[in-house]
Structures are given as C-alpha cells and as structure tokens.
Image: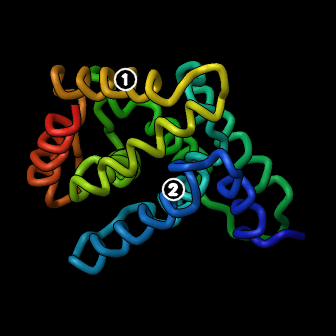
Amino acid sequence: MLTPLERILPFYAGPKRHYHNWMHISSMIQSLLHYEAGGAVIANRNELIEAILWHDAVYVPGAPDHMNEKQSAQEYFRYWSLMQHQTRPNFQIVYDAIMATSDHFNPDFEPTVETDAWIMDLDLLGFATPFIDFVRINENIAAEFVELGGVEYEEVFRVHRLFLKNIGDKKLLKFHIVPDRDQLTEVAYRNINRFI
C-alpha cells in the first residue's frame, strides 16, 4: 500500500508541471503554518490540508470550468477508497474546498465556509509575492499552456497578460480570510498592473 505522499507526489511531478507542481503545494502548506504561528486558528484543519494536497492533482491547462477540480477530487476519493482502518476526513468539506479553487475569479462566488476561504486565499498568494517571483510564476503558468502544443510561448504569454488585465480591470482577485488580506490585495493588484 502506498503512503499518502507516495500516492500524491506523482501527480505533481510531471515534466509539464511548471507551476502547478509540488513546490506550489508546499508553499501553500508553509503559508498555512505561517498563519497558524501568527495565531490563526483553522477550523477543519485536517480537511484543509487534504484539500491543499489534492486540489491540483489533475491539472490540464485550459480545461473546461471545474473539470480539473472535479477530477482532482475524484482522485482524492479514489485514494481514500483504497485506505482501510484509517481515520477519514470529512469528504464533503474536502470536496467543497477543492471545488472552491475553481471560483477564484468568479465575482458571484463568496465562500461561506472557512475552509473554502482559506484554500482560496492560500492558492492565490502567488499574486502577492515580490514582483520578480510574480513574473516567474506567470511565466511558469504560461509554459504549462505551451506544453499543450500548437501555440508559441509569445502568443500564450500575450493571452495570459490579457487574462491578468481582465482580473485587474474588473477587480476579480479577492482575499477572503487571511489576516493580512488588505495588504495582500494591494500588492497583488500592483503586481498585475506592473506586469501588464
């Protein structure tokens, strides 16, 4: 029987995973630990960690809405169906948190559950990094689209900048629960505006 890490790591280790890889997952976990060290109390912590670990298990650039998240949740459930005599997390909380990551830029979506708000915020922290890291992250995201084939990097990067411009123009990026959300939002929009 594979250990949890042996089961999850191969999803994130593919050569086409330039951004949605284990480093992204590790960064989210480290950020969670940082907020906890600062006094944040996380309800459903185990479910949040499970959702972080599995939320990008399946990642196909440009996939139809919610497809990646649904397939990631299916892989999570498949994994747990093989486990016996283990304390199981609340599947619905994990599923909802994974699915919440598909609504980052949906202006009509407001998380009503703390677990969903935490995963959404942790997943978007890359927008509020120092600018040089923001550039690297977005180059890596664009590179994942190039891996699909049939399109040049410059064209992908141009379209990605338009995507970011839309986020900036419509103010679609929002942090929901992290204590420093106002500062992070300011940094994220400054990065977007400088980048485009």
Numbered badge on residue 136? none
Answer yes or no: is residue 169 visible: yes
Residue 135 horizontal/vertical position (percent):
31, 47
Q: Residues under labels 2 and 1: Cα distance? A: 29 Å
Residue 65 horizontal/vertical position (percent):
53, 21
Q: Quadrant of the N terminus?
A: bottom right
Residue 54 horizontal/vertical position (percent):
61, 52
Residue 193 is left or right of residue 45, and the answer is left
Between 82 and 126, the one nearer to me in the picture: 126
How dense is the environment of label 1, judged by Cα within 10 Å: few (below 14), some, or many (20 and up)? few
The secondary element bearing badge 2 is classed as helix
The secondary element bearing badge 1 is classed as helix
Name the residue at 62% across, 26% down. 67
Answer yes or no: is residue 94 visible: no
Above/below status of 66 relative to 140: above
Residue 144 is left or right of residue 107, and the answer is right
Q: Which residue is mark 1?
A: 158
How dense is the environment of label 2, judged by Cα within 10 Å: few (below 14), some, or many (20 and up)? many
Q: Which residue is mark 2?
A: 52
Residue 106 is left or right of residue 87, and the answer is left
